[in-house]
Amino acid sequence: MGLDVRDLSVRYGPVTAVSEVDVELADGEVLALLGPSGCGKSTLLRAVAGLERPSAGSVHWDGTDLARVPVHRRGFGMVFQDGQLFPHRDVAGNVEFGLRMRSVSRARRAARVAELLELVGLAGYERRRVTELSGGEAQRVALARALAADPRLLLLDEPLSALDRMLREQLAVDLAALLARDDATAIVVTHDHDEAFTLADRVAVMARGRILQLDTPARLWQRPAGDEVAEFLGCTTLLPAQVRDGVATCALGAVAVAEPDGEARLGLRAAGVRAERLGVGAGAAAGGVGADGGGGVDAGGVGGGAAGGADGGGAASPSLGNGDGGHPVAVRVRQRTGSVTSTDAVVGTVRERVHRHDHVRLTVTVPEAPEAGRVEAVAGTADAPGVGEAVRLTIDPDGIAVVGP
Ligand SMILES: Nc1ncnc2c1ncn2[C@@H]1O[C@H](COP(=O)(O)OP(=O)(O)OP(=O)(O)O)[C@@H](O)[C@H]1O
């Protein structure tokens, strides 16, 4: 049955840090609490641990109300951001601490410590001083210490955030594998999307003390419940769309979606809007943008538009228009899988350009689609369009979300 948090609120004087939160967590499941600083993630975790007293609501484990159960009797393990190891004990002394408290024999303690150090990738580290460990090693020891007592629930508060980026990414992968191997039930607090998505079976997105959406990573990514979640998860452009026969058409073009006919709201991430210099010909467009292999270019499409040239003016090229001055001409639809039907491409002008590690991020204005505002788009690092250049935008279905309940 696991954890059951019902209608939980925590107040600090006038501040409501957690507001009417419901969470259920099954045995063996890993949940991430994800949200911006101050949204109440740590307070919720601490209330589950018994470190904060709820002002309303309840926390149950396997049907037992924990209101009167003190922290050390809940059977939960905790790991904090900075590990909080005992500096005067060596690695083994830290890991076995909980076992000593339970009067486990010396031989069994040593065997368990060795097993746990192996599990966290620190075999043979027993006699090392904890003050001489790297940040990543110290967090692994903290994790081994928390696991030593066989907690029925592991509570991890930003366990990797004190580490540098490379190490964090690697440790997140290691931690996910370790939690799975140990069949651990865990709640992880993080403000890092990638970390949440790497570690958790389900993710709760929080804001202002509330859970806005609790879902699997895939569903959160593809179906954020509202604009706030979509924006938090990187959708920089939100637009109304019309869906017909599995194709959603918005002011920036058309894209395949698994939605019924009718109105929809699309959230576009920068990575889902590809920009190409207008001077690039149809062949280049098919190779570059249609890299999924499903894309072709149908008649009257990009080739004609490209002939319009890179005039740098930013106005829609006449040859890309459909003649009525309104919406752009059909070119193709890019789909996650399957074949090509039809789509739109629009033309805009690059206003800003920033190099990221593996792509160039562009801010583009699209005269034909003023409602889209300043559109965030990406281009490859080789020969990326510059500020003032005209670009053709294409929507990539992998980078879009359908927003709404
Ligand atoms: N002991 C306290 N006394 C008063 N207010 C508090 C206390 N602890 C937290 N708060 C407030 O409660 C709100 C939620 O804080 P909390 O630490 O849970 O947020 P968080 O999402 O974990 O943030 P962060 O990612 O910055 O740690 C914040 O407005 C914070 O200022």
Image (cartoon, rainbow, N blue to C red):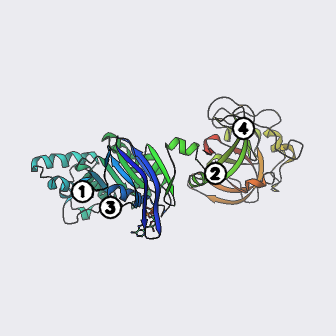
Name the element at disc 4: strand
Give the residue furthest to the top: 339
Residue 284 seen in this snapshot: no
Checking the image for residue 270, the label placed there is 2
Q: Is residue 190 visible?
A: yes
**Amino acid type at image mark 3:** Leu
| CA separation in Å, label 2 and label 4 | 25 Å
Where is residue 316? Give x, y as percent.
83, 50
Q: First in sequence: mark 2 or mark 4? A: 4
For residue 89, above or below residue 109: below
Badge 1 crowding class, 10 Å Cα cut-off, few under 14, some 14 to 19, many 20 or more, is: few
Distance Cα–Cα, label 1 vs label 2: 46 Å
Image label count = 4
Q: Earlier in the sequence, mark 1 or mark 2?
A: 1
Residue drawn 86% across the image and 41% down it: 322
Residue 262's disc is 4
Which numbered dot is residue 51?
3
Q: Residue at x 76, y 43 (%)?
A: 345
Disc 2 marks which amino acid?
Answer: Ala
- Contact check, label 2 and label 3, Cβ < 8 Å: no
Residue 162 against residue 220 in the figure, above or below: below
Judging by the rendered image, the residue that carries numbered circle 1 is: 72
